[in-house]
């Protein structure tokens, strides 16, 4: 248990930040799930729209430190490749 005042404040800050990051991560997962569902349904236009909505969310999560920037880029790249494969 934290003893000093500054340590107690730090634990409060960590708890707040954890909650924010958790909601951001959950939001990103939701956007990714929508893209994957659209890909599974085989609808190219819906998948493209879902990807267009998901891309800024994933990049925002990376800029906020929720995801590593390379991880975000990899996710976007792989989703884009899968959407592109639908048209072929």
Image: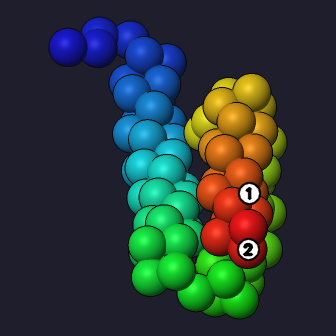
Please state, as top left, top right, bottom left or bottom right, where the C terminus lies in the image: bottom right
Report the Cα–Cα distance between label 1 and label 2: 11 Å
Percent x, y of residue 52? 78, 74
Determine crowd level at label 1: few under 14, some 14-19, many 20+ residues with C-alpha closer than 10 A. Answer: some
| Image-quadrant location for residue 86 | bottom right
Residue 12 in view of the camera:
yes
Using the image as rendered, state which of residue 24 and residue 49 is in the foreground. Answer: 49
Label number found at residue 66: none
Badge nearest the viewer, 1 or 2 = 2
Judged left or right of residue 13, residue 45 is right
User: Mark 1 highlights which residue?
Assistant: 80
User: Mark 2 highlights which residue?
Assistant: 87
Which structural element holds mark 1?
helix
Using the image as rendered, state which of residue 28 and residue 38 is in the foreground. Answer: 38
Q: In the displayed structure, would residue 74 be above or below residue 61?
A: above
Mark with earlier residue (1, 2)? 1
Using the image as rendered, state which of residue 32 and residue 66 is in the foreground. Answer: 32
Residue extending furthest left? 1
Using the image as rendered, state which of residue 8 and residue 81 is in the foreground. Answer: 81
């Amino acid at each position: 248990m934290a003893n000093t005042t500054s340590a107690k404040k730090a634990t409060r800050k960590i708890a707040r930040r954890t909650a924010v990051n958790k909601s951001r991560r959950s939001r990103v997962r939701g956007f990714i799930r929508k893209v994957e569902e659209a890909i599974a349904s085989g609808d190219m236009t819906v998948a493209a729209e879902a990807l267009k909505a998901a891309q800024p969310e994933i990049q925002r999560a990376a800029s906020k430190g929720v995801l590593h920037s390379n991880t975000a880029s990899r996710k976007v790249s792989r989703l884009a490749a899968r959407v592109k494969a639908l048209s072929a």
